[in-house]
Image: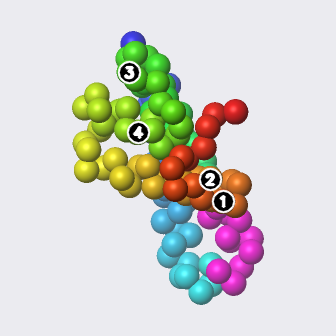
Amino acid sequence: MVDAARLRALLDRIRDETAHLRRLAAVGRDDLLADPDLMAAAKYRFVVAIEASIDAAEHVIASEGLRAPNDFADAFASLAEAGVIPTDLLPRLQAMARFRDLLVHGYASSTTAGSPT
């Protein structure tokens, strides 16, 4: 069974981080790109929000006994297959998981979004 308090805490974290990202976006592209500290802040906020999203997905998968994912992007596919999230949202969530690899490791993968280590 899903731990509602844990899931709510993860969703709250995602909401808080995206609010910070919206404020950073308001700075403007050129100013953001010119300031390495602002860029680092934006990257950190993205990583935290994406990690919380992945954690939420993995919590629901484990709690509900859904298909175990092969990687982070596949976690969202597992949720879509079970009808937990709409299938039209799936490509964006998978792209987000892959963006995490770019932020954290400096590379992108066309087939995976990273494996838990």
Query: What is the span of residues highlighted in magenta in the rendered image?
Result: 33-46
User: In which quadrant of the rendered view does residue 87 lie?
Assistant: top left
Q: Which residue is mark 4?
A: 76
**Residue 86, how many percent across, how many down?**
25, 42
**Can residue 85 be seen at all in this image of the molecule?**
yes
Structural crowding at the residue carrying mark 1, measured as other residues with C-alpha within 10 Å and reported as few (<14), some (14–19) or many (≥20): few
**Residue 21, how many percent across, how many down?**
53, 62
Structural crowding at the residue carrying mark 4, measured as other residues with C-alpha within 10 Å and reported as few (<14), some (14–19) or many (≥20): many
Structural crowding at the residue carrying mark 3, measured as other residues with C-alpha within 10 Å and reported as few (<14), some (14–19) or many (≥20): some
**Residue 1, how many percent across, how many down?**
39, 13
From this view, report whether residue 94 is shown above or below residue 9: below
**Residue 30, how many percent across, how many down?**
59, 86
CB atoms of marks 1 and 3 within 8 Å = no
- Alpha carbon distance from label 1 to label 3: 29 Å
- Alpha carbon distance from label 1 to label 2: 6 Å
Q: Which residue is mark 2?
A: 101
- Alpha carbon distance from label 3 to label 4: 11 Å
Q: Main secondary structure of the magenta part?
A: helix
From this view, report whether residue 46 is shown above or below residue 24: above
Q: Earlier in the sequence, mark 3 or mark 4?
A: 3
* Residue at left offset 35%, top offset 33%: 79
Front-most of residues 102 and 19: 102
CB atoms of marks 1 and 2 within 8 Å = yes
